[in-house]
Image (cartoon, rainbow, N blue to C red):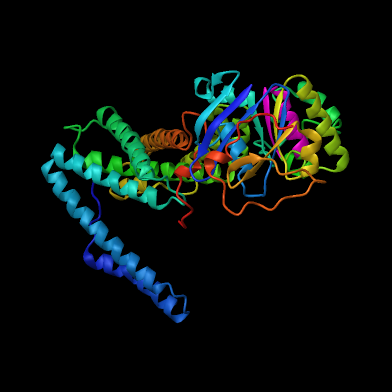
């Protein structure tokens, strides 16, 4: 469904990957390795080069707002442009269905954004993104501010979306979560994607001394399960 | 009109007030005397030069020299606008946009007034063209400067909010709208306030000048109202232009926010 070939931001990033319908790809990497930059580039939020297609259609052939509605990026700390909650939802009723699932069933339109906790904001932002019904969700640490119950709720909700064919790229620093939610894993290091390091429970090999060349660091995107 | 002419002695006497000020600053160690002295000298030199320039311009009534003087005024105003920006657009865009918008706004409004309401003969007579342009330009400059400054600083601060809308599929116009509104409000507030307060809080300088020069107060008031309309028109044209063009420059055709087109913060 989603294909990213040689996506480049000079000196920061060069990455290729593919994502199938209903597939969840986890991307791990140390902070500063460029995980958010990669997702932002796929959503075309920063200048970047490369061939990115959705169902065979080139990104450049679609108006950028349409592209971002279909390939929706959810940052770890989403932005809010109005004072009260209601103004951020085009279709409150539709989003309410997600509120129910995420433990936000009391939500009211006149709630001031400034009074929401980090975790509440994160779940409202997820609802806001789900409500526009994107084909691909680019999730950037979507559970970083949540307690265990909320994490379970979010993971359950995303799993359902995967069932309906939505593709998900899930950036997480947590290897256990990556294993739990994703079908396959990639590891981002200095802006280059590599096959995932072994998961917990397996021996972690030493990093190779010599940096991989950018060519060999490119991942064909084949499933590595 | 029979204005009471001022002699140099009259001015010297009035300058005593500044001398007293400087003395106070010295006596109380306020450390204002240096700045006070410099700005007093600047004021005297600049105004005397302007007087000479205007006298020459008025005696020639040349369209060439009048338009050169007008362009010089606009170029200085562009410099002022750029100097007041905390975060400038890269590559001279701050100066270009600011100057371009002022040239258009002040030019259109001044020519409109000269060709209709004031209509001297010839229409470009510097006795009318230069003062009108000066009043319109001075206020348009404030509006353009405030509008551009508020646009860039609010966009920098509200980056996450603007990008949140872009991420959800808003186009750049929609995503920038709250910031555009804030910038326009900041640009228009001075003229809106001064129209609301004028006459009650302070007598406008131009009207006061006409009255001191012996004009009928009712006539002076009419002139002042005309000037207020011209100023409001110039300010809104200039501010709208610079805020919309600045917003376009800080986004791109792929509807991305391009804060990389701003220079890093520089103390204003």
Q: Nearer the viewer, residue A53 or B52?
A: A53
Q: Is residue B198 magenta?
A: no
Q: Residue at x 58, y 24 (%)?
A: A67
Residue lying farthest to the left in this orientation: B60
Quarter of the rendering occupied by the N terminus of chain B: top left
Measured as percent of width and height from the top left, residue B201 is found at 49, 48
- Would residue B207 be found to the left or right of residue B176 on screen? left
A60 w.r.t. B189: above or below: above
Q: Is residue A120 visible?
A: no
Magenta span: A122-140
Q: Residue at x 53, y 24 (%)?
A: A59
As rendered, which of A222 and A115 lies closer to the eye?
Answer: A222
Q: Residue at x 53, y 33 (%)?
A: A6
Residue displayed at 34% across by 39% down: B102
The quarter of the picture where residue A103 lies is top right
Q: Nearer the viewer, residue B150 or B60?
A: B150
Give above or below for A58 relative to B257: above
Pinpoint residue B142: horizontal percent, then vertical percent. 42, 45
| Labels in figure, total | 0
Q: Position of residue B110 (x, y in %)?
A: 30, 34
* Residue A179 appears in the figure: yes
Judge whether residue A135 is colored magenta.
yes
**Left or right side of B121 for A197:** right
């Amino acid at each position: 469904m989603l294909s990213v070939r040689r996506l480049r931001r000079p000196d920061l990033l060069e990455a290729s990957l593919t994502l199938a319908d209903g597939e969840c790809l986890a991307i791990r990497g140390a902070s500063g390795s460029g995980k958010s930059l990669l997702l932002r580039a796929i959503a075309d939020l920063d200048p970047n080069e490369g061939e990115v297609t959705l169902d065979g259609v080139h990104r450049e052939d679609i108006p950028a707002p349409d592209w971002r509605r279909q390939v929706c990026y959810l940052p770890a700390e989403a932005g809010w442009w109005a004072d009260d909650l209601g103004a951020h939802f085009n279709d409150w009723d539709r989003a309410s269905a997600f509120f129910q699932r995420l433990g936000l069933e009391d939500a009211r339109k006149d709630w001031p954004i400034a009074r929401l906790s980090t975790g509440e904001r994160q779940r409202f932002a997820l609802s806001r993104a789900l409500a526009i019904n994107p084909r691909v969700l680019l999730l950037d640490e979507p559970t970083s501010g949540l307690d265990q119950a909320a994490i379970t709720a979010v993971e359950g909700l995303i799993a359902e979306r995967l069932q309906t064919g939505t593709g998900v790229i899930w950036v997480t620093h947590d290897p256990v979560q990556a294993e739990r939610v994703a079908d396959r894993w990639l590891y981002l290091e200095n802006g280059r994607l590599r096959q995932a390091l072994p998961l917990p429970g397996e021996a972690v090999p030493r990093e190779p001394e010599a940096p991989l060349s950018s060519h060999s660091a490119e991942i064909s995107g084949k499933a590595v399960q | 009109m029979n204005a009471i002419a001022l002699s140099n002695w009259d001015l010297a006497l009035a300058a005593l007030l500044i001398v007293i000020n400087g003395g106070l600053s010295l006596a109380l160690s306020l450390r204002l005397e240096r700045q006070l002295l410099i700005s007093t000298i600047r004021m005297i030199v600049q105004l005397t030069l302007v007087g000479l320039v205007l006298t020459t311009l008025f005696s020639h009534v040349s369209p060439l020299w009048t338009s050169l003087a007008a362009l010089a005024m606009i170029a200085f105003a562009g410099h002022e606008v750029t100097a007041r920006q905390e975060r400038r657009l890269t590559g001279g865009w701050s100066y270009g946009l600011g100057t371009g918008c002022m040239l258009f706004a002040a030019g259109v409004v001044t020519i409109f007034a000269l060709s209709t309401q004031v209509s001297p003969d010839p229409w470009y007579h510097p006795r009318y063209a230069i003062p009108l342009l000066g009043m319109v330009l001075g206020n348009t400059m404030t509006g353009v400067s405030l509008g551009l400054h508020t646009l860039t600083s609010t966009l920098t601060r509200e980056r996450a909010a603007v990008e949140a809308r872009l991420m959800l599929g808003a186009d750049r116009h929609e995503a920038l709208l709250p910031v555009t509104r804030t910038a326009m409000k900041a640009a228009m507030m001075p003229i809106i306030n001064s129209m609301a307060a004028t006459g009650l809080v302070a007598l406008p300088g131009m009207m006061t000048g006409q009255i001191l020069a012996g004009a009928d107060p009712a006539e002076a008031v009419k002139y002042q109202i005309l000037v207020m309309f011209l100023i409001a028109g110039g300010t809104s044209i200039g501010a709208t232009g610079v805020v919309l063009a600045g917003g376009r420059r800080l986004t791109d055709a792929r509807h991305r926010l391009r804060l990389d087109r701003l220079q890093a913060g520089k103390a204003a």
